Amino acid sequence: MNMPPDDQFMSDLAREFLVEYAKSLALLRPSVTKQDGKALADMAHRIKGTARIFGFEQMATVSEELERNLPLKDWKAIESLYEQLVGLFEKERP
């Protein structure tokens, strides 16, 4: 069954979001190790907004929680949230 053009376009964009951000998250692994809160905050903020646009609410929620934890500098919790986010992308990736 073919999707209407607008639905297909949004589906293509969502797929591109999943692929590109999964790559970006992988590149941020050293930021977790080095405890680079700025790089993680920037990525978490972008993922939160974009994930909500495409209806990936669990990704948006984990990203928001990651954002909230960064100022607390609880790196054990931050690393756990980062890993959750990576897992969500791996689960959803096309």
Image: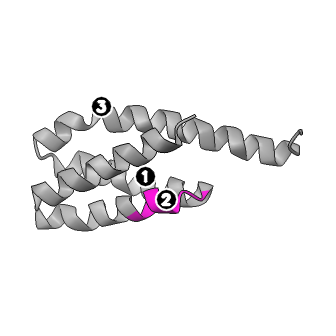
Helix or strand or loop: what does disc 2 sit on? helix
Q: Nearer the viewer, residue 53 or 61?
A: 61
Q: Nearer the viewer, mark 3 or mark 1?
A: 3
Asked if the magenta segment contains residue 59, the reply would be: yes
Q: Is residue 50 above or below residue 27?
A: below
Image quarter of the C terminus:
top right
Look at the numbered discs 2 and 3 and tell me whether their residues touch, using CB distance below 8 Å: no
Residue 34 vs residue 29: left or right? Answer: left
Instruction: Identify the residue under disc 1.
Output: 46
The span shown in magenta is: 55-61
In the image, which disc is placed on residue 27?
Answer: 3
What's the amino acid at mark 2?
Answer: Gly
In the image, which disc is placed on residue 80?
Answer: none
Residue 80 vs residue 73: left or right? Answer: right
Residue found at x 54% / y 41%: 17
What's the amino acid at mark 1?
Answer: Arg
In the image, which disc is placed on residue 49?
Answer: 2
Magenta stretch, main secondary structure, is helix
Look at the numbered discs 2 and 1 and tell me whether their residues touch, using CB distance below 8 Å: yes
Residue found at x 52% / y 53%: 50
Q: Quadrant of residue 66?
A: bottom left
- Crowd around label 1: few <14 · some 14–19 · many ≥20 (10 Å): some
The alpha-carbon separation of the residues under discs 2 and 1 comes to 5 Å
